[in-house]
Amino acid sequence: MITKPERIFDRVREWQGLVSFVSGAPAGPVPGGATLGVVSGRRRQGKSFLLQALAEQMGGMYFAATEATEAESLRQFAEALTRYTREVAEHPFRDWNDAISYLFRSFRGRPVPVVIDEFPFLSRVTPSLPSIIQRELGPGGSGRESDARLLLCGSAMSVMGGLLAGQAPLRGRAGLELVIQPFRYRDAAEFWGITGPRLAILVHAIVGGTPAYRYEFTQGDAPADLADFDSWVIRTVLNPQKPLFREARYLLAEESDIRDPALYHSVLAAIAGGNTTNGGIASYVGRKSDQITHPLNVLEDCGLVAREPDLFRPGRSRYRIVEPLITFYEAIMRRRWPELELHRAESVWRSVRPTFLAQVVGPHFEALCRDLALEADETLFGDFPAEVGSGVVNDSANRTQIEIDVAVLPPQEPGRPRRILSLGEAKWGETMSHHHTSRLARARDLLAQKGYDTQETILTCYGGSGFTSELKRDAVEDDRILLIDLNRLYEPR
């Protein structure tokens, strides 16, 4: 196994997957030949950093495309090949047919990674490029006698996701499909050097697990402690002189499929403001429900929004912004943008801090609690979670609805009612008490009436501000009541 450089934090599984792809024999009935891998992920996640290190460690080639005409891109690609092989092509490449064929012929003798980064820049100008690669990888193509391990990488999620989907030319050709995700919340805290869980959640609610925000966008500035958090927000995220200030806007502008930024910002603002259903978003934006279907689909394809089904109401779902920085921008910065540009961050932050805690940190804390449940082993809830999400339980007798923040279900067993491992409520700024477990117990009874198996359901309280002494006593006496505080949320796995 090729050793992962120490400068790369975490990414152990990703590194192992890449090394295995490069080193392993190609799959299929015909031995030998070039293989294809696709690496994608939202911007700033460290894809290029990882692939550059892979090329260095394994003696491969790394080429980063730029926004350019086809002719200029071909010249840049030819120059990169010449620097790597130390051989000059006899004739300039006329088009990508020549370039891809020459590429595969140049890599023989041992498997090495050949990285083409920012691939969407090339395919946008030359839409036939995926078909050319497919042909050269196929029977009779130049790739059949090559040892190249071609890795196509890009951040345009809608483009990269389409490379291997449906009837796309490269479908079925890839031996690796790797999506580089942001760091999980525990890893992000370690990456930022934060040991206190409350501070870790506050920071994660703004910058998430995106690696680039730790050094490149803040110049290594991290809050020293909880008392320094407000000052850190003012001097970094709300500072017009820092790259992080405009980053959320750029994340949206970089997506080529977004043609009406005003509409998309309004959709995101609706979600950030707590309007998470299709109807709620449409009402906030001032459009009909069918008129926001396309923007929501585009945001999903771009990896900026996720649609999460209601576990207890089939056909219902809610939308969640995946990138915390966009939530922070839409809920906190966008309406006060002119003042922030005038360096009035201190006064703006004082007035919006309650909104930050309610609309940003609260929902983000709920999402982290669902992450905890999803990663749990069988000891936490009595079985392995197979499905974790949120849901709404209708209480017709009391003419109300009970929202379940963290519902945990095991795998479906044929011929048996669906079991519920846990029903949970998460509160960031409220001390949890009997009131919360009573609501959960009522939801448990209602779900039992609907045919769910709730005999062993655990009522879980996720408390950001602690629990009453009475509730703590109940949890000691009743093993079907579970309390999870911030320290337990950040316990090592």
Image (cartoon, rainbow, N blue to C red):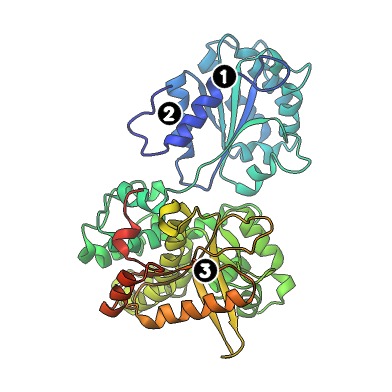
* Relative height, residue 398 to residue 379 (above, below): below
Does residue 56 appear to the left or right of 193 in the view shown? right
The answer to whether marks 2 and 1 mark residues whose Cβ atoms lie closer than 8 Å is no
Location of mark 3 (residue): 455
Nearer to me, 342 or 256:
256
Q: Quadrant of residue 475?
A: bottom left
**Is residue 246 in sight in this rendering?**
no
Res. 53 mark: 2
Q: Residue 165 location, x and y as percent? A: 72, 43
In the image shown, does 469 or 335 lie closer to the viewer?
Answer: 469
- Tell me the distance, in whole angstroms, between the alpha carbons under discs 1 and 3: 65 Å
Q: Is residue 355 left or right of residue 169?
A: left
Measured along the vertical axis of the image, is residue 284 above or below residue 81? below
Name the quadrant of the N terminus. Answer: top left
- Report the amino acid beneath label 2: Ala
Pointer 1: what residue?
81
**Which kind of residue does numbered mark 1 sit on?**
Leu
The earlier-in-sequence mark between 1 and 3 is: 1
Q: Residues within 10 Å of mark 3 (few under 14, many from 20)?
A: few
Which quadrant of the structure image shows residue 185? bottom left
The mark lying in front, picked from 1 and 3, is 3
Q: Secondary structure at mark 2?
A: helix
